[in-house]
Image (spheres, grey):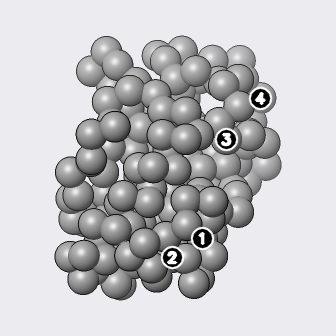
Amino acid sequence: MEAPELIRLNLSSPLEYARAPLVPFSGEFPVGGETGEFLFCFELDREQAARIDPDPGAFPGELVFAGKRGGSPGEPASAGKVLLPEGLYAFCQKRRELDRDECVAMAAELQKDGLWERLPLGNRLYIRCLFEDGSPVTQFFRPCF
């Protein structure tokens, strides 16, 4: 897989999602115009999150929450909201849906590039899946402090 381009992204407003009982990488919810947009938040192992040569087995980490927005008009409301908070992020994306192995590779590469650029990365990894400009997009966010 081609290495992603690392971008420093300043997210000026939080992105809000309805908390949802989603299972990441299950293939149960393809991204598309009718299915909406998904956000998964993972907590990375502290030791692995600070390594320039992280163990791919440590990614994506433990699921903290999942959220969804958009979708069908009659879809039931979920309990609570979750956020991709505003702030500075190391960011990269691929303009297609990625499977688990591809997400692990992208997350590890984002970490390597971020640390190489001397960005102080946080332990959270956010993966956002959406449909944009006629195609699925998978985005990766790591907070920078």
Check disc 4 and report its element: helix, strand or loop. Answer: loop
Question: Seen in the image, is 123 located left or right of residue 144?
Answer: right
Which residue was labeled with disc 4?
76
Pointers 1 and 3 in contact (CB under 8 A)? no
| Disc nearer the start of the sequence (1/3) | 3
- Which amino acid, mark 4? Pro
Check disc 3 and report its element: helix, strand or loop. Answer: loop
- Depth check, mark 4 against mark 3: the one in front is 3
Q: Which mark is residue 24?
A: 3
Q: CA distance from mark 1 to mark 4?
A: 31 Å
- Which amino acid, mark 3? Pro
Which residue was labeled with disc 2?
49
Q: CA distance from mark 1 to mark 3?
A: 15 Å
Q: CA distance from mark 3 to mark 2?
A: 20 Å
- Depth check, mark 2 against mark 4: the one in front is 2
- Which amino acid, mark 2? Ala
